[in-house]
Image: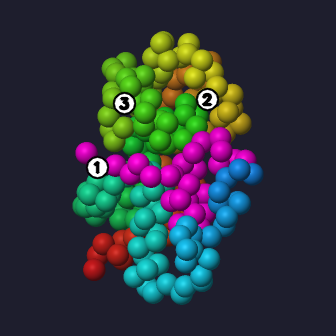
Amino acid sequence: MARYIGPSCKLCRREGEKLFLKGEKCYTDKCPVVRRPYAPGQHGQQRKKLSEYGLQLREKQKARRFYGVLESQFRKYFEMARDMKGVTGENLLKILESRLDNVVYRLGLATSRAEARQIVKHNHITVNGKRVNIPSYLVSPGDVIAVTEQMKNSERMKIILESTGNRLVPSWLEFDAENLVGRVVSLPNREEIDLPVKEQLIIELYSK
């Protein structure tokens, strides 16, 4: 399966804002977006006025990179959102937020979505008591997400919890910090998703 293996910070610089792809580093002055707040490449510092299509494309790329989703899967999510009742843009974000790797990240069990994806792939997460190693697994209201005993007692998890201890858990999730168990209360509405993306531009791009 294809995946991006280049420098994560270049993606943030290309979008012109932090996508929080590197965990702890994103919260320090070492973040390349802080040190070099312009796009990568020899022409990165030149200011260019984007066309309507360019604006739509940048919003789509930004959303994709926030969640670490490839183009084919992102389009699949758009088609799912289009076929659901309600506003397509909000439905798209709900689907992306429902991914298991994103929920693990939102619960503070990983410093980044990339690390959450790795934790899930390595069989360290259970959903309703059963191990799930598919990062794209979509959770539902009422699902219980927990960390396996092996991972719970690991040094890495202790470091993660120290780093994410001050992170607020979204209102659509509940988290038992003592037992490292989370529960999906409901699917989020747009106000509960702190994503600086104009989803309507994405819908316009795919609807052409």
- Specify few, some or many for label 2: CA neighbours under 10 Å numbering under 14, 14-19, or 20 or more: some
Q: Earlier in the sequence, mark 1 or mark 2?
A: 1
**Looking at the image, what colour scheme do you see?**
rainbow
Residue 151 at what x, y percent from top left? Answer: 50, 18
Q: Is residue 6 magenta?
A: yes
Q: Which residue is mark 3?
A: 121
Residue 50 at what x, y percent from top left? Answer: 49, 84
Quarter placement of the C terminus:
bottom left
Q: In which image quadrant can residue 138 be found?
A: top left
In this view of the protein, can residue 62 be seen by the observer? Answer: yes
Magenta-highlighted residues:
1-28
Seen in the image, is 158 located left or right of residue 83?
A: right
In-front residue for pair 27/95: 27
Q: Earlier in the sequence, mark 3 or mark 2?
A: 3
**Is label 1 or label 2 in front?**
1
Q: Is residue 170 magenta?
A: no
**Could you say whether the residue bearing mark 1 is in a helix, strand or loop?**
loop
In this view of the protein, can residue 192 be seen by the observer? Answer: no
Q: Which residue is mark 1?
A: 2
* Residue type highlighted by circle 2: Ile
Q: Which residue is mark 2?
A: 160
